[in-house]
Amino acid sequence: MKKEVLGIAFDDLTRAEAAKAGAALLEEDKFHYVVTPNPEFILAAEKDEEFRTVLNGADLVLPDGIGVVYSAKIQGTPLKERVPGIEFAADMLDALNNRGGRLYLLGSKPGVAEEAGRRIVERFPGITLCGTQDGYFKDEEAALLKVAAARPDLLFVCLGAPKQEKWMARWGRHTGARLAIGLGGALDVFAGRVDRAPELWRRLGMEWAYRLAKEPQRAGRMAKLPLVLVKAAGKRVKKA
Ligand code: UDP
């Protein structure tokens, strides 16, 4: 069931339900893409119609941040739980490992996707890493041709938003992949270049605070987040 939060229609699933739905998409012989919007996406999509359309056109729209879950609650349409993109990605690696299949990693700085891939196949030996490419290409179509030549089943697209979502919507079906996921900085995490917050911080919904403390340069971007909560409250007031 979809629930709209400030113009974006989210799938109301637990992490386990999202993993099951994602694994089913991986079995279907056609292209699907998944997006994992956080509050920054919601604000950007308000001003960017193409981005909004691309997000709403995804096969699964998962609430990546606690800010989305709070906004949904404030608005009066609560979502079951947050489903962080990185955790959904790990679940899809598990699913691909179980059935056997090919993984392509697109994005991040040169060297990061290779390192992430090396670590992933070490942990999931049923996965074939069929290719990697950094995310600083000039020619979108040339990047696509490289991906398609590798014949992936599962494709991680980590170019930052909204570039990664627009790339998936525009080129995804030509890659031959069954499932593409837009995952922001996830390859940096899989490569061990950036730590995720410790479990306790995550359980408390405080991962954003941990990231802010580690990367203070994100403060400008994060300062926008309370705005989403205010807008959600405004929506509730209008409904009342
Ligand atoms: N990136 C990229 N190509 C670009 C811009 C960004 O591959 O043209 C990568 C960047 O190296 C990083 C990821 O995209 O690995 C986005 O990171 P960001 O922190 O912006 O995303 P978030 O995790 O916050 O969604």
Image (tube, grey):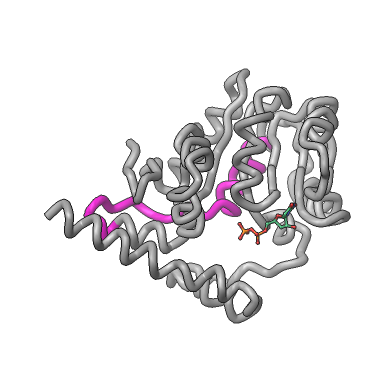
Residue 122 visible in image: no
x, y percentage for residue 6? 35, 50
Residue plotted at (71% across, 23% down): 174
Looking at the picture, tell me which residue is in the foreground, 175 or 125.
175
Residue plotted at (82% across, 44% down): 137
Magenta residues (range)? 73-96
Total label count?
Answer: 0
x, y percentage for residue 102? 76, 32
Residue furthest toward the left? Answer: 240
Residue 201 visible in image: yes
Look at the image and tell me in which quarter the C terminus lies: bottom left
Ligand 1 positioned in quadrant: bottom right
Q: Is residue 26 magenta?
A: no
x, y percentage for residue 228? 38, 62
Question: Seen in the image, is 156 located left or right of residue 80?
Answer: right
Residue plotted at (40% across, 57% down): 68
* In the rendered image, the vertical position of residue 11 relative to residue 201, given as above or below: above
Looking at the picture, tell me which residue is in the foreground, 162 or 109.
162
Q: Main secondary structure of the magenta part?
A: helix
Look at the image and tell me in which quarter the N terminus lies: top left
Residue plotted at (60% across, 32% down): 169
